[in-house]
Image (cartoon, rainbow, N blue to C red):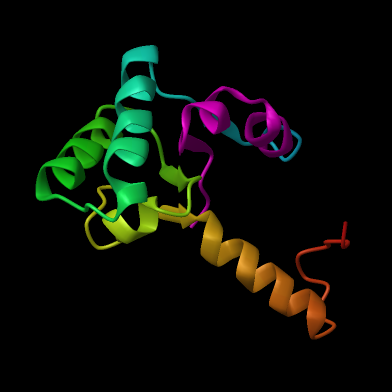
Amino acid sequence: MHLKKLLLTGIRYTMQADFYPKVFQEHGLEVIVPSAPHQAEIDAIIFGELVINNFTAAAKRRMLEMIAAYDVDGVILGCTELPLLITPADCPVPVLDTLTLHAEAALDYALGDDTWNVEPI
């Protein structure tokens, strides 16, 4: 599977920062950020519900509706709480769970596998 166009979700700061788009663009991938109203809604779901351990069916449904509204090949869950709400089985497109991916890259690096080509900070 090769994903070329990804939707970035997370807190408003993450969605508005250029880190993800810049890094992905360097590898020929396009990162789409949600519209301003969707960014506000995603941010409100994260801070108003998820960070206080309130995972509702309504929040899950709304997140999935917002993801489905974009013509993308996959979604980046760029906040540690989002994978607790949305699983790959729920989602209409492939999911990139940054928490899991970061942990896997750190483990690979610690074990001497340079597949991820990462350097410690």
Residue at point 36%, 37% (across, down): 47
Q: Is residue 66 magenta?
A: no
Q: How many numbered marks appear? A: 0
> Is residue 105 left or right of 57 when viewed as pictured?
right
Q: Residue furthest front?
A: 52
> Is residue 23 left or right of 42 when viewed as pictured?
right
Residue at point 39%, 34% (across, down): 72
Name the foreground residue: 91 vs 48.
48
Residue 88 lies, in percent from the top left, at 32, 60
Q: Residue furthest top?
A: 36
Magenta segment, which residues?
A: 1-24
Q: Is residue 12 above or below residue 68?
A: above
Residue 93 lies, in percent from the top left, at 32, 48
Residue 93 at least partly seen: no
Q: Is residue 25 above or below residue 100?
A: above
Residue at point 83%, 73% (across, down): 114
Quarter the C terminus occupies: bottom right
Q: Is residue 21 above or below residue 89?
A: above
Q: Is residue 2 magenta?
A: yes
